[in-house]
Amino acid sequence: MESSLPVFIDIPEKEQANEIRQYLISAGADLTSTSKENILEEVSCLLDACDNWLKSAADADLEALMNSFIYLILFCSFDEKLTRKFCTKVTDVGASQSNALLRINILKNLFTALPATSGLRFDTYLGQVNLASKFGLTDDIETQLKVVDDWLNKWNVIIENRRTCYRDLHGALKDQQKSEEATRVILKLLSTYDESSATQAKEDAEKCVLDFIGKQDVFIMDHLLKLKPVEILAGQPIHKLLEILVSGQLSDYKEFYNANKEFVDKSGLVHDHIIEKMRILTMLSLAINNKEISFAQIKESLHLDEDDIEDFVIDFVKSGLAHAKIDQINEKIVIRSTSRRTFGKGEWEELQDRLQIWLDNLSLIKTSMEQVVKHGHGG
């Protein structure tokens, strides 16, 4: 993003503004009034006259004229109203698949020209996000959440504008099938709400929950229940479904679906995909509580045909949630280790106890080795 500035034509500002005026007039713009004496007013007037031209301009002309405007904006000390008007023109007027990347690069030129701490950089970046989202060009803009967060902090962006940025960036990433990045951004968005503002995030919370439930490779989602905007959804079908995904069983989901079929179908979720996910999660619950699980128990709990059990167990292991092996002779699954579906206070206490045992054992080993070294030296 921090690329070098383009080279601008070194001529007086009013002369350059007049050249833009004459060019736009030759291109059919309505600029019959005399030019403004104030350069800021003149540039603003010229930008207003660009709309029709922007809709049909050739790429080379578009790049040259917009870079000339950037030069004049520099001269006007990045007047906020003028700079935002420029960003709006580049982003919204005449943008198409064929020129979207060029427009992104024009906004990058302005971004680089602005002081590093200028809040106007936010407007130029948001314009890039909107173009990238509309025309599938997220690979051509900065999307790393850490970088974007650093920028927002440096620019002192107010909370509502931060949320706009996260929301637009999430949409752009999701549309481009960048699932992991989109997930990080939507979680960041929800984290900006506290108890007093959580009700404002209902729509964002619903999108977040649906994203997680719809991901075929995401199984652990208890952390969502702790987010204030998600807590606000309590009592609604989407919250109940999340609770089932967090701690329920396959039978719970089937009962839920029978009572809320219309909600599931309209939400964009795929019923069969949720069934598959719930089978794996139900199997995980069995594995957490049992070191060995019989084929008969799997068949009953997961509503599987006997011929499908082996294939399912292979998929279960591939999920990365557990290490297990099939004992074909005794028709059972032997569990070696598992992940947890939820991780609350009890799990933290259990982890603390295990770490203390390991620490005690290491202390004993250290003491024993010191004794061995001491006796060895004494010998």
Image (spheres, rainbow, N blue to C red):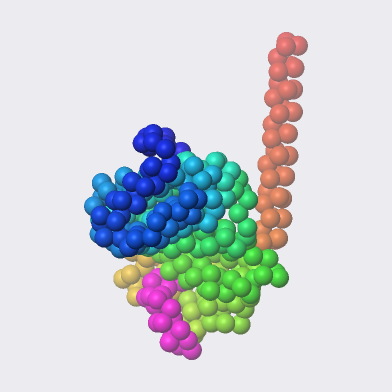
Could you tell me residue 81's position as x and y percent? 53, 57
**Which of these two is toward me, 165 or 267?**
165
Q: Position of residue 46 (x, y in %)?
A: 39, 55
| Residue lying at 72% horizontally and 55% vertically, measured from the top left | 349
Is residue 342 visible in the rendered image? The answer is no
Name the spot of residue 78 as percent of width and height, x first: 52, 47
Residue at x 38%, y 42% (from the top left corner): 15
On-image quarter of the C terminus: top right
Say left or right for 138 vs 207. left
Q: Nearer the viewer, residue 28 or 345?
A: 28
Q: Which residues are magenta?
A: 257-282
Is residue 180 rendered to the left or right of residue 351?
left
- Residue ID at (70%, 14%): 376
Does residue 232 appear anywhere in the picture? yes
> Which image quarter: residue 328?
bottom left
Taking depth in this image into account, of 327 and 244 the one nearest to the observer is: 244
Residue 121, relative to residue 307: is it above or below?
above
Image quadrant where one finds the N terminus: top left
Query: From this viewpoint, which residue is outermost toward the bottom?
Result: 259
* Magenta part, dominant SS: helix
Q: Is residue 260 magenta?
A: yes
Extreme-front residue of the structure:
34
Q: Is residue 212 above or below residue 371?
A: below
